[in-house]
Image (cartoon, rainbow, N blue to C red):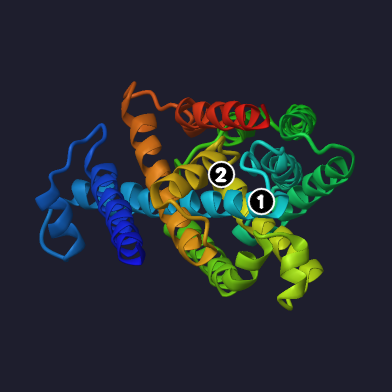
Amino acid sequence: MEQKRRIRYTISYLVLVLGIVLFFVLNVCIGSVKISVSDMLACLTGKDVTDSVSAIILNIRLPRAVAVFILGGALSLAGYLLQTFFHNPIAGPFVLGISSGAKMCVALLMVFLLGHSIKINSASLILAAFIGSMISMGFVLLMTRKIHSMSMLVVCGVMIGYICSAITEIIITFASDSDIVNLHNWSRGSFSGMTWDNVKVMAIAVTTTFVVVFLLSKQLDAYTLGDSYAGNMGVNVRFLRVMIVILSGILSACIVAFAGPISFVGVAAPHLIKKLFGTIKPILMIPACFLGGSLFCLFCDLLARNLFAPSELNISTVTAIFGAPVVIVILANAKKEKR
């Protein structure tokens, strides 16, 4: 039995890694300008390619693909942490309105700074998004004291998201005409316009957070079995809860700061990964959820860019198409279990 599990885990990881490699290459090669795999490899290895091809790969598609890999993994990991925290399979940054809170504060900062002709840096965007995510998380935590129903928690999260989105729209009306288009595109979720400076900042923030989360895997393993069990195993439950909230907030903040709110990945990817691996052990789920979120977003971003080219869909439009049915299945299964 143990050997079968190891084989399943190994095959599952191989599927995720190979899928990421495949869609990463496709994201770099496929677009309005078709680029062959040989040209991509030649460019990456420093061999001679045309200046236009080199510029497209190195300045546009490659940083975008790397950003999708990092932020997609971060979004899935944030969803996994929130599901662990609430012991709820449909908890996620977008579903609970946490992404909308982060979006609200980032929009407020952007309008203020752009209105005063102040340059915006990545650190300030992440900080604003983190504050917004913590505000929304605070409201969600207040709701969980009164509401224990899974579906009602989703409704409350959606309501919080609508309120934050309405405030964001009011804030955007105070932006100058030249900034409104960019703010609207960002507020609907998009990986376009990524630069290597963006990638550097998000890589540092997400990698650091990932390492801390992975170091907490044993404590999270005990926590998944209940607060009492975790306490008996010597886990400081209150400290662990605070860490989960902060770490999920940082991950959500990075996503919203650079790509805007992205729907349903934080719910769908962890759920699909749990089904693939057949386990909930954090030491396996933490890296697997990161890889699963990356694969999910690379696939969705490829469709968003090319499905109706040259027009580009918002990434949340595509992720909702594939992610929303997963949420419906989870809710349906939860109701069957109650019966």
Residue in view at x 50 percent, y 26 percent: 325
Query: Sequence order check: which comes first, mark 2 or mark 1?
Result: 1
Residue 242, labelled with which disc?
none
Residue in view at x 70 percent, y 51 percent: 129
Q: Secondary structure at mark 1?
A: helix
Residue in view at x 76 percent, y 42 percent: 108
Residue 275, image x and y in percent?
A: 44, 45
How many numbered marks does the figure carry? 2
In space, the residues marked 2 and 1 are separated at their CA atoms by: 9 Å
Residue 266, labelled with which disc?
2
Residue 164, image x and y in percent?
A: 77, 34
Q: Is residue 66 above or below residue 240?
A: above
Mark 2 residue type = Gly
**Viewer-nearest residue: 286 or 338:** 338
Residue 82, labelled with which disc?
1
Mark 1 residue type = Leu
Crowd tier of the residue under label 2, counting other residues whose Cα lies within 10 Å: few below 14, some 14–19, many 20 or above: many
Residue 27, image x and y in percent?
A: 29, 43
Answer yes or no: is residue 106 visible: yes
Q: Is residue 308 above or below residue 73?
A: above
Q: Is residue 158 left or right of residue 287?
A: right
Look at the numbered discs 2 and 1 and tell me whether their residues touch, using CB distance below 8 Å: yes
